[in-house]
Image (cartoon, rainbow, N blue to C red):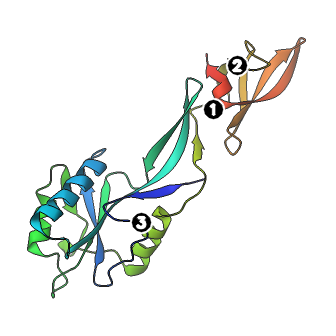
Amino acid sequence: MDTPAVADNAAPDQPLNPNMRLFTLRVASNKEDRVRDAIVRKTRIEGLEHKVGRVLVPVKKVMQVKNGQRHFVDQKLYPGYVFIEIEPDEHGRIPQDVWFTAKETEGVGDFIQASGKPHPMGKDEAARMIGESEKKDEPELKTDYQKGDKIKVIVGAFEGFEGDVDEVLADKGQVRIITMIFGRPTPLEVAYEEIEKL
């Protein structure tokens, strides 16, 4: 299950300013958080808070299992993009001071454009994206185990047993393995953290 969250400069439940539109900014891969933080900081320094609202990097929380240990990590929903609420000028364009503040930030590419100028998301699309990014559910279980992987049970009643992954049961955080017990192939369901790849 997804657990998206919003990493931004404002509370996630802050209402949208009805005059602001959501613009999409292309950024260098794996620099989304750094770009967001820099734009937020520069917006405050330049006194542009009345023109710039939230700066969003939507994420979902996932649980990964590596070496038998569970780790929670934030996974970006839209890698390579940062979303910025901006109040357009009277001509529907990004104000020049805001445009320069964003464009002069290290790691920034360009705004998504239509007809050669930055184009905001439609209001329905922006509301849906922000709504998705504010959902709160259980963390998604993520694993690198696949059918056919050779594994060894490292803890529990079957410690030391080896087998092949027959099925990944992601909703349970387990895999079904086929191992030999008393000379017969036997299915076992074991948690991700109880096994390791051979």
Residue under pointer 2: 155
Residue drawn at 25 percent across, 48 percent down: 34
> Cβ–Cβ below 8 Å for labels 3 and 2?
no
Label 1 vs label 3: CA separation? Answer: 36 Å
Amino acid at dot 2: Val
| Mark 1 or 3, nearer chain start | 3
Label 1 vs label 2: CA separation? Answer: 20 Å
Please determine whether, in this image, residue 171 is positioned above or below residue 127: above
Given residues 165 and 39, the one toward you in this image is 39
Mark 2 secondary-structure assignment: loop
Local crowd at mark 3 within 10 Å, few (<14), some, or many (≥20)?
some
Residue under pointer 1: 146
Residue under pointer 3: 12
Local crowd at mark 1 within 10 Å, few (<14), some, or many (≥20)?
few
Local crowd at mark 2 within 10 Å, few (<14), some, or many (≥20)?
some
Label 3 vs label 2: CA separation? Answer: 41 Å
Please determine whether, in this image, residue 148 is positioned above or below residue 92: above
| Mark 1 or 2, nearer chain start | 1
From the top left corner, tell me how far across and down residue 176 is, in percent.
Answer: 75, 31
Residue drawn at 60 percent across, 25 percent down: 68
Q: Quadrant of residue 152?
A: top right
Q: Which mark is residue 170?
A: none
Left or right of 179, for residue 110: left
Given residues 124 and 20, the one toward you in this image is 20
Residue drawn at 28 percent across, 79 percent down: 20
From the top left corner, tell me how far across and down residue 8 is, in percent.
Answer: 34, 59
Please determine whether, in this image, residue 153 is positioned above or below residue 7: above
Q: Quadrant of residue 120?
A: bottom left
Mark 1 secondary-structure assignment: loop
Given residues 83 and 137, the one toward you in this image is 137
